[in-house]
Amino acid sequence: MSKHFTPEHKFSIIIHLFIDDSGNLAYAEYPYLPIKSLIKMDQQVEVVYWGMIPYVWDSDGIVKEYGQVHLDFWIPNVSDEFCSSLLPN
């Protein structure tokens, strides 16, 4: 990864903890790149997943506001799938 990124990119690894289909605790590791760094790279990417995560609901359980955007993507000439997120201000 060092040939593609510098410390200014703020590249890191995200560890995703989850319960697998057998009920066991499992984890996956994903390369993480902040959206701000991705924008500064001015690099076209292939989006694999995009989602908005709600954080405010009304009394009927209807989503009123979303608080985070999650993005999984491929960067050309890099073999790993990356993830990123954007939190509200």
Image: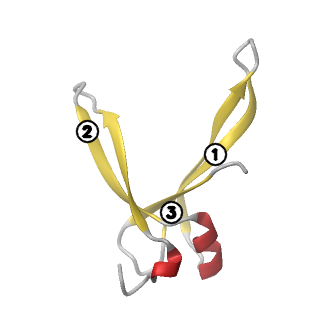
* Numbered badge on residue 26: 2
Q: Amino acid at mark 2?
A: Ala
The three-letter code of the residue at mark 3 reads Phe
> What residue sits 75% from the left and 34% below the top?
65
Q: Secondary structure at mark 1?
A: strand
**Quadrant location, the N terminus:** bottom left
Q: Secondary structure at mark 3?
A: strand
| Distance from Cα at disc 2 to Cα at disc 3 | 22 Å
- x, y percent for residue 84: 53, 58
**Residue 89: x percent and y percent?**
73, 51
Choose top left, top right, bottom left or bottom right for residue 64: top right
The image quadrant that residue 35 belongs to is bottom right
* Residue 59 in the image: above or below residue 66: above
In the rendered view, does 85 fall on the left or right side of 63? left
Q: CA distance from mark 1 to mark 2?
A: 24 Å
Q: Is residue 74 left or right of residue 26?
A: right
**Comparing marks 3 and 1, which lies closer to the viewer?**
1
Alpha carbons under labels 3 and 1: distance apart: 16 Å
Q: Residues within 10 Å of mark 1 (few under 14, many from 20)?
A: some
Label 1, on which residue? Answer: 68
User: How many labels were placed on the picture?
Assistant: 3
Give the SS element for disc 2.
Answer: strand
Q: Is residue 11 above or below residue 43?
A: above
Identify the mark at residue 73; answer none if there is no mark.
3
Placement of 59 over or under 71, stated as above or below: above
Which amino acid, by three-letter code, is at mark 1?
Gln
Crowd class of label 2 (few under 14; some 14 to 19; many from 20; radius 10 Å): few
- Residue shown at 65%/73% (left/top)? 39
